């Protein structure tokens, strides 16, 4: 896996000139006049000057003024090689509390309102006659996706039938829509989802207001809505996301399907899958990911192809279809690194999903390494205080939590979850689901730290109380957003069950575990990993605290059966079940059964090896160069394990 090379090369004459110019910037009249003329430079030169300005705190206000100008920003944004450098400028300004993202979305909407006020000749124009403010809903509650216009065939340029519109107004409307799509997608990529939603909702409202729309414009509206759905789902803005999803479904019924580029269909269905995945509705997520896979073609833009593969891989992971998942995420990661390089956000996104896969197939150490690389790339691109960076911190924290569970040393895990929570507090409301998710990981850590302190004779009731408050907050929010019958809700019940077991509140613990098992079984089936996890937790409660040994025996055997089906005889989680059964049989004085499982435990320890972190994954990465047709063929031919 490629690492980031931070070695600096000697400056060229061009770079020396840029640096000299920026070093001399000040707020004199002459210099300010010079800065105002920067807009006339070629975009490749302009963005290099802006990058140097972003690294100087004393001229960041000057840079903010420049980039808040929509004419300037649009010029640079349309220069595709500048995209990574624009991320740097945006992150530098936002980290200094200079709100460029907010300026851009407000300026875009204000500019649209002002222009339409003086240019509208009829009520049937491309502009909306309702207030933009009324169409930009506030975020409801509480994996970057490059949906840039360049990745989808330029529907605007392909439009053949413009006679139905007043051309003087259409010209402005087309340009405004095109820029709005680019700006909305850029803000989403950069991690400023709320601002992205504001821009894309403005564009969607404008398109929605067209009373007589031809097929080309319906396709353009579809493109806008799928971008909007991505940003809403990424921000867990599920109420708006469901409205957007319903609007897309209705729109697809109106469009001639053969007129929609397959790349746009693949992207749209991938957004459907991502929305359902974020809601933990895994059957629907998997179904839409399969539909998206069917629309991949050899000429599908690589950005879209990688996103389709990534999302399909995640959907396969939660369906425990690990062979397909490995093939898909290996291809996505390989393609992203080969095409975009080791410092690109697309590669980091693929690595995060690869880490998710590794964690779920019990390759925990490898997962930690992959997550660390992804976090390094995210911070390199977006800075330290960013939505994408916070998510990467949380993912790495949870991987460390699983990795460090047997050692009791949660230093690394706690460091990263604290950073995730700290960043999220600045970016989202206090009742946001994403903040609750980070706090859930923090609650798990506090519980384990408290247990270690209690073993040392230190009273840590304060930590347990904090953990309970965090878990109950996450559960309540999950119930409000998802309802009772949801995997996330079940997980929160299970977390509370484990906590109450630690707090010696055994009846409450039993009730929580039973709720978790029932919900997970109803939703996922009796042999899912999540079901086995909750069964094992209830078995532990019955065994060590409530003295219900026969009930514990039955549950341990069920948990073992699930683990063996999914992961085989070397799965790390089997240790706790084997130890639990040994305790049950020793207590019941059933020594023959005790010896049987003591021997099985010894064999397990042999399989795991002397140093478990060196174990190879059962699913080695597949780095072969494959065509998309070959990937599709293997995907649809592979049988579920």
Image (cartoon, grey):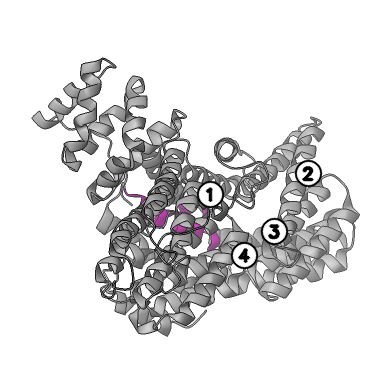
Which residue is tagged 4?
280
**Would you call the spot at circle 1 few (<14 residues within 10 Å), some (14-19), or many (20 or more)?**
many
**Label located before the other in sequence (2 or 3):** 2
Q: Which residues are magenta?
A: 344-367
**Label located before the other in sequence (1 or 2):** 1
Tell me which residue sits at (34%, 59%) in the image. 173
Q: Position of residue 469 (x, y in %)?
A: 77, 42
Label 1 – label 4 distance at C-alpha = 17 Å
Tell me which residue sits at (35%, 82%) in the image. 633
Q: Nearer the viewer, mark 2 or mark 3?
A: 3
How many numbered dots are placed on residues in this image? 4
Can residue 175 be seen by looking at this rendering? yes
Which residue is tagged 2?
468
Above or below: residue 429 compared with residue 263: above
**Would you call the spot at circle 3 few (<14 residues within 10 Å), some (14-19), or many (20 or more)?**
many
Mark number displayed over residue 481: 3
Label 1 – label 3 distance at C-alpha = 22 Å
Q: Nearer the viewer, mark 2 or mark 4?
A: 4
Can residue 321 be seen by looking at this rendering? no
Tell me which residue sits at (87%, 64%) in the image. 549
Above or below: residue 294 compared with residue 201: below
The residue lying toward the viewer, choosing from 108 and 590, is: 108
- Helix, strand or loop for disc 4: loop
- Secondary structure predominantly adopted by residues drawn in magenta: helix
Q: Position of residue 176 (x, y in %)?
A: 34, 55
Q: Quadrant of residue 264?
A: bottom left
Mark number displayed over residue 395: 1
Q: Nearer the viewer, mark 1 or mark 4?
A: 4
Q: Position of residue 514 (x, y in %)?
A: 82, 64
């Amino acid at each position: 896996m490629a690492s980031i090379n931070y070695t600096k090369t000697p400056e060229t004459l061009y770079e020396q000139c840029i640096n000299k110019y920026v070093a001399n910037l000040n707020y004199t009249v002459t210099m300010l006049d010079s800065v105002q003329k920067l807009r006339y430079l070629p975009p490749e030169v302009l963005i290099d000057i802006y990058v140097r300005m972003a690294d100087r705190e004393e001229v960041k206000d000057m840079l903010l003024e420049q980039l808040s100008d929509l004419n300037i920003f649009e010029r640079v944004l349309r220069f595709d090689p500048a995209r990574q450098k624009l991320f740097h400028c945006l992150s530098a300004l936002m980290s200094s509390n200079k709100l460029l993202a907010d300026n851009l979305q407000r300026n875009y909407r204000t500019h649209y309102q002002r222009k339409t006020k003086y240019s509208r000749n009829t009520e049937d124009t491309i502009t909306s006659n309702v207030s933009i403010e009324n169409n930009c809903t506030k975020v409801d509650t509480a994996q970057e996706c490059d949906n840039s216009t360049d990745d989808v065939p330029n529907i605007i340029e392909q439009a053949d039938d413009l006679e139905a519109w007043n051309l003087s107004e259409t010209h402005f409307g087309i340009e405004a829509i095109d820029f709005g799509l680019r700006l909305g997608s850029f803000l989403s990529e950069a991690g400023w989802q709320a601002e992205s939603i504001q821009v894309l909702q403005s564009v969607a409202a404008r398109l929605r207001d067209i009373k007589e729309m031809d097929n080309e414009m319906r396709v353009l509206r579809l493109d806008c809505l799928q971008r909007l759905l991505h940003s809403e789902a990424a921000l867990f803005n599920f109420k708006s996301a469901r409205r957007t999803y319903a609007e897309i479904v209705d729109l697809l019924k109106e469009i001639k399907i053969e007129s929609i580029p397959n790349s746009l269909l693949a992207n749209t269905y991938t957004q459907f899958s991502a929305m359902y995945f974020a809601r933990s509705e895994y059957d629907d997520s998997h179904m839409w990911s399969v539909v998206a896979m069917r629309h991949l073609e050899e000429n599908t833009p690589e950005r879209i192809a990688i996103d389709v593969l990534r999302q399909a891989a995640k959907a396969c992971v939660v369906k425990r279809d690990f062979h397909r998942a490995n093939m898909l995420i290996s291809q996505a990661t390989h393609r992203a690194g080969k095409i975009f390089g080791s410092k690109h956000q697309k590669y980091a996104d693929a690595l995060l999903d690869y880490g998710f896969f590794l964690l779920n197939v019990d390759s925990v150490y490898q997962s930690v390494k992959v997550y660390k690389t992804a976090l390094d790339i995210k911070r390199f691109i977006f800075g330290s205080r960013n939505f994408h960076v916070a998510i990467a911190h949380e993912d790495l924290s949870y991987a460390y939590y699983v990795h460090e569970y047997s050692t009791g040393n949660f230093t690394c895990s706690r460091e990263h979850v604290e950073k995730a929570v700290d960043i999220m507090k600045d970016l989202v409301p206090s009742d946001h689901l994403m903040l609750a998710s980070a706090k859930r990981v923090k609650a798990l850590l506090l519980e384990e730290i408290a247990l270690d302190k209690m073993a040392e004779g230190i009273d840590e009731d304060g930590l347990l109380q904090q953990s309970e408050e965090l878990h109950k907050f996450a559960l309540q929010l999950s119930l409000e957003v998802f309802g009772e019958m949801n995997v996330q809700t079940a997980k929160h019940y299970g977390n509370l069950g484990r906590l109450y077991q630690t707090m010696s509140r055994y009846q409450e613990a039993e009730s929580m575990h039973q709720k978790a098992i029932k919900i997970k079984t109803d939703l996922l089936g009796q042999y899912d990993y999540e079901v086995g996890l909750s069964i094992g937790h209830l078995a532990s409660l019955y065994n060590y605290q409530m003295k219900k040994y026969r009930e514990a025996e039955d549950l341990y055997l069920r948990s073992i059966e699930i683990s063996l089906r999914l992961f085989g005889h070397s799965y790390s989680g089997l240790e706790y079940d084997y130890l639990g059964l040994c305790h049950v049989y020793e207590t019941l004085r059933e020594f023959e059964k005790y010896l049987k499982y003591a021997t099985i435990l010894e064999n397990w320890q042999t399989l795991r090896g002397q140093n478990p972190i060196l174990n190879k994954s059962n699913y080695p990465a597949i780095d072969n160069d494959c065509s998309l047709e070959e990937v599709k063929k293997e995907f649809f031919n592979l049988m579920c394990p």
